[in-house]
Amino acid sequence: MKNIVLIGMPSSGKTSIGKEISIISGREFIDTDEIVEERSGKSIPEIFEEQGEKGFRVLEREAVREASEKSDAVIACGGGAVLDEENIKNLKRNGIIVFIERETEQLSTEGRPLSSSRERIKEMEKERMPLYKKYADYTIKNDTTPVAAAETILRGIK
């Protein structure tokens, strides 16, 4: 069975919705940011501080490749995973890509190296929104509870 791949802006709800999809469907839940942290032994902010965005993206590419080799899983990707076409190629090979869309004002800036201010979030959204829309097989607005969003996604991708 194909993976359910969640993409969207940082703090759009990919992880919380992904965990609910996993519970409801019995699929394994995989968070690519968690893979990066486990493999490196460092938090995402530490990786950005020590290696910069470029170093982080190398680690993220490997995490996405590893996650996309699974099947019947729910994969929550980092917000910038769509910036690398290799990531998209790997994810689309065995996955249905779901874009979790959330109003910019609802996105958190706390503990997020690239989205530390409202201005930066708006810049990121301008750059990434066309990519999210281009690569998504299905889109959902996250304006409800994680459980309701998960149920909507599972109904929508059947």
Image (cartoon, grey):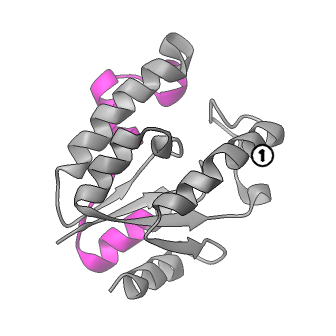
Q: Which residues are magenta?
A: 18-47
- Left or right, 132 with respect to 123, comes to left
Q: Nearer the viewer, residue 70 or 23?
A: 70
Q: Is residue 33 magenta?
A: yes
Q: Residue at x 53, y 72 (%)?
A: 139
Q: Quadrant of the N terminus?
A: bottom left
- Left or right, 128 with respect to 62, comes to right
Q: Residue at x 72, y 34 (%)?
A: 116
**Helix, strand or loop: magenta stretch:** helix
Q: Residue at x 41, y 23 (%)?
A: 42
Residue 39 at x, y = what percent?
A: 28, 27
Residue position for label 1: 122
Residue 156 at x, y = what percent?
A: 42, 85
User: Considering the numbered disc 1 on the image, is that residue within a helix, a strand or a loop?
Assistant: helix
> As displayed, is residue 121 above or below residue 1?
above
Q: Is residue 4 magenta?
A: no
Q: Quadrant of residue 85?
A: top left
- Left or right, 95 with respect to 77, comes to left
Question: Can residue 152 be seen?
Answer: yes
Q: Quadrant of residue 5?
A: bottom left
> As displayed, is residue 76 above or below residue 113?
below
> As displayed, is residue 120 above or below residue 75?
above
Question: Can residue 13 be seen?
Answer: no
Kindly identify the amino acid type of the residue bearing the numbered disc 1: Lys
Residue 140 at x, y = what percent?
A: 56, 74
